[in-house]
Image (cartoon, rainbow, N blue to C red):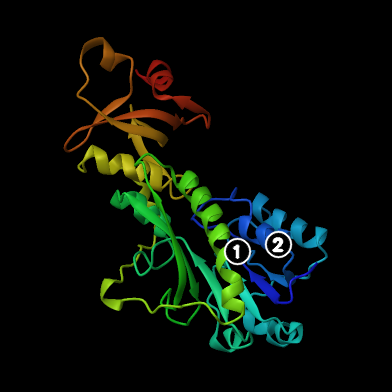
Amino acid sequence: MSKSKKLVFFGNERLSTGLSSVGMPTLKALLSESYDITAIVANYSEGKSRNTHQLEIAEVAKRHNIPLLLPSNPLEISEQLSSYKADAAILVAYGKIIPDSIIDIFPRGIINIHPSLLPKYRGSTPIETAILDGVSETGVSIMKLVRRMDAGLVFAQARINLSGNESKQELADKLSSLGAETLIKTLPSILDGSANAKSQDEKRATYSKILKKEDGILDWAKPARQLEREVRAYAGWPRSVTRVFGYKIIVTKAHETNAPAGKEKDEMLIVRANPGWLQIVELIAPSGRTVSGADFVRGYRK
């Protein structure tokens, strides 16, 4: 039986820069709970125009006979959105600014899943920033979308502890699943108006950084611990790059290690940082192949 409330879904559900295998847990959870999804509004301008994730959302829309809208600007479809008479919209990593006039179409507003414990890490890269900062805890916030970035009322939050070893992909997957689960628990009270929404403490607000390609260049004047975090945080994009034996490589796995000596040093790819040592465990070689650090040493050391 269909839920009594109608929803529009905004987004491709790609919660982190350069990731494509999240699998749309929120949209699938809404459908499995029999919510009436009247339309899906997706953004195909991110990355390549036909990547796996973008194809998946089109396939889901087709399978469930849901209109798939691909506007370059949401204002282009304002009349169409109004015609659906949806009670609310759900937004997950849509990637474009939503004008107030679009938000106002929905009586209960647009509900956003943000992958941080707001007001911490507002902005577009909260997952990467949490890894870079080495925090022991993060989570998701179910919030009401407003024009100011990630500043709306918060309906619910859920937390997870971090081991300090998560890659960006692993953390994005965990937060995507947690966000979907938390939304499903919270959505009925949001839609019937009984949810206890709380204002954010602006004095505690922090913002995640906008990543640039050059952020991925490993700076060996940094501590080894920070470089190890960068390798995990920048996986996918901008990726951690450096030169070893004169060759440009992309570091995909690394960990902080003790100072090498003798034969051990010869069999591993270990680079001195400031302070500490970073062992490059896995990398993409100039050939384009993914190899271990030890294999790279054997094949490329002159």
Residue at the extreme top of the image, as rendered: 263
| Vertical order, 100 against 70 (above or below) | below
Q: Nearer the viewer, residue 41 or 34?
A: 34
Which numbered dot is residue 232?
Answer: none
Give coordinates of residue 218: x percent, y percent. 31, 42
Task: State yes or no: discs 1 and 2 in contact (Cβ < 8 Å).
Answer: yes
| Vertical order, 99 against 211 (above or below) | below
Residue occupying the point 62% across, 87% down? 107
Which numbered dot is residue 184?
Answer: 1
User: In the rendered structure, which amino acid carries the disc numbered 2?
Assistant: Glu
Give coordinates of residue 270: x percent, y percent. 29, 26
Q: State which quadrant residue 7 falls in.
A: bottom right
Q: Nearer the viewer, residue 188 or 259?
A: 188
Q: State which quadrant residue 224 falls in.
A: top left
Give coordinates of residue 269: x percent, y percent. 33, 24
**Horizontal relation, residue 77 to residue 262: left or right:** right
Quadrant of the rendering where the N terminus is positioned:
bottom right
Which numbered dot is residue 33?
Answer: 2
Residue occupying the point 22% across, 20% down? 260
SS at mark 1?
helix
